[in-house]
């Protein structure tokens, strides 16, 4: 299964946060702000027969305006990608809907929060996208594009996850605690039935 870690892509240029004048040159890359790009790249490769690269994700983020904010705005890019690659798509704040999607063979990109109210974010100190690829009734199996061993060395984080690299596992309770529901926490993708991919 394809796993993409943004930390390996410092060499790929990515301009973002354009509505606020952009970011410093050293932050104009996928390593710094490409979690969403990595997630959509993994999902499209997992769910379709099409080849889709990080370079494609960077180009489409610019085409759709998903790069107008810091990082990428998935709710802008996802509908375009779903139509282009013939995937069913829905955004929701319902974890139960996300689980149903996974059980039907889909995948879910989750928007998780960073540090807040004196509590350390599990996956990041700022907002971050991760990909939920399965659920066994007890744990989610996750591909985290920002994963590093260093991230989970703190006791607060290590106690909440189980790591079998490149997979990270945690419970629904943890995901719900981390989910950012300010707009939509879960972006659901599934193969469309009885049609031919474009």
Image (cartoon, rainbow, N blue to C red):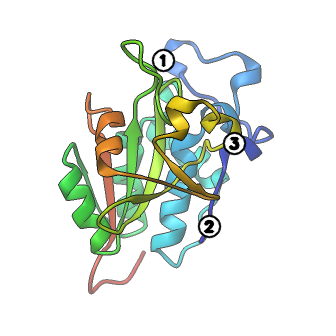
**Residue name at image x 53 percent, y 48 percent:** 60
Say which residue label 3 marks.
149
Where residue 133 sits, quadrant-wise, is bottom left
Which of marks 3 and 2 precedes in the sequence? Answer: 2
Q: Is residue 88 left or right of residue 15?
A: left
Work out how far the residue at label 1 is from the one at label 2, CA to CA, in angstroms: 32 Å
Which of marks 1 and 3 precedes in the sequence? Answer: 1
Q: Say which element carries label 3.
A: helix
Which of marks 2 and 1 precedes in the sequence? Answer: 2
Q: Mark 1 or mark 2: which is in front?
A: 2
Q: Mark 3 or mark 1: which is in front?
A: 3
Q: Is residue 182 above or below residue 99?
A: above
Q: Is residue 34 above or below residue 182?
A: below
Work out how far the residue at label 3 is from the one at label 1, CA to CA, in angstroms: 33 Å
Say which residue label 1 marks.
19
Where residue 16 sits, quadrant-wise, is top right
Say which residue label 2 marks.
2
- In this view, the residue farthest toward the bottom is 194
**Residue name at image x 64 percent, y 55 percent:** 4
Q: Which quadrant, please, contains the C terminus? A: bottom left
Along the viewing direction, whichever of 45 and 168 lies nearer the viewer: 168
């Amino acid at each position: 299964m394809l796993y993409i870690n943004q930390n390996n892509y410092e060499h790929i240029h990515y301009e973002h946060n354009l509505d606020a004048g952009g970011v410093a040159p050293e932050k104009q890359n996928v390593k710094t702000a490409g979690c969403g790009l990595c997630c959509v790249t993994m999902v499209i490769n997992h769910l379709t027969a099409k080849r889709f690269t990080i370079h494609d994700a960077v180009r489409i983020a610019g085409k759709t305006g998903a790069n107008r904010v810091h990082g990428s705005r998935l709710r802008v890019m996802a509908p375009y990608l779903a139509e282009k690659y013939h995937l069913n798509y829905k955004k929701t704040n319902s974890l139960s809907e996300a689980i149903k999607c996974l059980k039907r063979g889909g995948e879910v990109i989750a928007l998780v929060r960073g540090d807040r109210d004196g509590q350390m974010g599990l996956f990041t100190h700022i907002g971050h996208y991760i990909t939920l690829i399965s659920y066994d009734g007890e744990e989610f199996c996750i591909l985290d594009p920002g994963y590093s061993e260093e991230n989970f060395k703190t006791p607060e984080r290590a106690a909440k996850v189980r790591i079998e690299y490149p997979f990270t596992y945690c419970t629904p309770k943890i995901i719900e605690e981390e989910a950012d529901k300010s707009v939509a926490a879960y972006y659901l993708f599934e193969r469309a039935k009885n049609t031919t991919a474009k």
